Image (cartoon, rainbow, N blue to C red):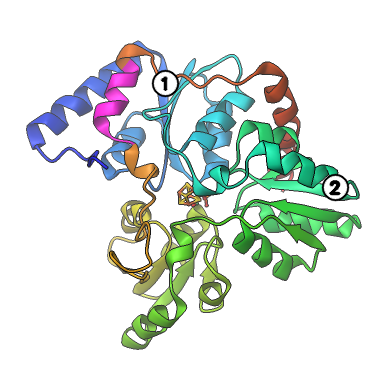
Amino acid sequence: MPDPRVHDPAEREALMERVRRLLREQDAVLVAHYYTDDDLQLIAEETGGCVADSLEMARFGARHAATTLVVAGVRFMGETAKILNPEKRVLMPELGAECSLDLGCPAEEFVPFCDAHPDRTVVVYANTSAAVKARADWVVTSSIAVDVVRHLHQRGEKILWAPDRHLGRYVQDQTGADMLLWQGACVVHEAFQADLLRQVMAAHPEAAVLVHPESPEDVIALADVVGSTTQLIDAARRLSNDTFIVATDRGIFYKMKQAAPHKTFIEAPTGGAGATCVSCAHCPWMAMNGLRNLAAVLETGTNEITIDEDIRRRALRATQRMIDFRAGI
Ligand code: 13P
Ligand code: SF4
């Protein structure tokens, strides 16, 4: 896969300037995820856009007055922006930026699975297609999943959960809800290894361990804090430890270092390149976003997200519930 980062300082500055100008000219705002390239996070912040987890990306896009949202992340993030903002133009630097959870839960298989369990409330992770969201009762992200499922469990509802089996098991554990789990996984987080993590922890006994809940159960069991990307950054700022071992995509280090400049961040170990690790703590799809394709979409208007209107309306119901639930917390 080509490296999207721009290493030549002159080219980088020229691209940055082009992006700043185009964002202004196009009445556009950049909404970036923490896992994207540092340059994209920098320019999003600098130009009044946002760098956030998937829930806050959705909320920011819906609140902002710009008529074009440029979503630097993976496809489901662009689709969520369009579901919530049909009147806005939503562009992405790379439409081929997928997510293994989304790919592993095609609507043609998911819909009959739901139909076979009509007694269950369907809760899907945001990392799904618009067509899957259209079959759901609720959409959640990792930052809000436990709260939503606890609420549904307290109302006596049984849950059908998709697609991430690790996050689903974690939520089940935290809430005690009756959950039937789709068996999807994230290629990035699934590669973290508990036995290797224990070795790093032994070498850094002073460190706190921060884990994203898409990680396997035995890795989560070693965590001091389990949470969404924003919650992990907050923990890095809040905890008194000077060192952190972090089990999520390494793109998050840009913001963690900003949040706690004097602290040390260590990547949690994976099998390593050439072993079982497919992605080695960096999402291959997030990595498709760079300054060059960002400038190009702003210039050409290509890579616009479109969603069939009937699917969008149905997906909006479940997505809006998440936004409203968040507003009520
Ligand atoms: P967050 O909502 O925690 O940012 O997670 C999104 C994601 O894709 C993590 O892999
Ligand atoms: Fe999907 Fe995993 Fe990449 Fe997040 S890190 S976008 S869950 S493949």
* Secondary structure type for disc 1: loop
* Secondary structure type for disc 2: loop
For the point 54% across and 16% down, the residue is: 88
Estimate the spatial distance between the alpha carbons at disc 1 and disc 2, rounded to whole Å.
Answer: 36 Å
For the point 30% across and 43% down, the residue is: 37
Q: Residue 155 in the image: x percent, y percent?
A: 90, 55
- Does 316 appear in magenta? no
Report the amino acid beneath label 2.
Ala
Q: Is residue 137 left or right of residue 238?
A: right
Q: Residue 207 in the image: x percent, y percent?
A: 38, 79
Decide: is 45 above or below 250: above
For the point 19% across and 26% down, the residue is: 15
Residue closer to the observer: 228 or 328: 228
Q: Please give the count of numbered marks on the rendered protein.
A: 2
Decide: is 187 above or below 27: below
For the point 64% across and 58% down, the residue is: 183
Report the amino acid beneath label 1.
Asn
Q: Residues within 10 Å of mark 2 (few under 14, many from 20)?
A: few
Q: Is residue 219 left or right of residue 169?
A: left
Q: Is residue 247 visible?
A: yes
Which-is-in-front pick, marks 1 and 2? 2
Residue closer to the observer: 293 or 112: 112
User: What range of the chain is rendered magenta?
Assistant: 289-298
Dot 1 or dot 2, earlier in sequence: 2
Task: Give the labeled residue for mark 2.
Answer: 116
Residue closer to the observer: 254 or 159: 159
Using the image, tell me which numbered label, if any, was put on residue 303.
1
Q: Residue 84 in the image: x percent, y percent?
A: 63, 26
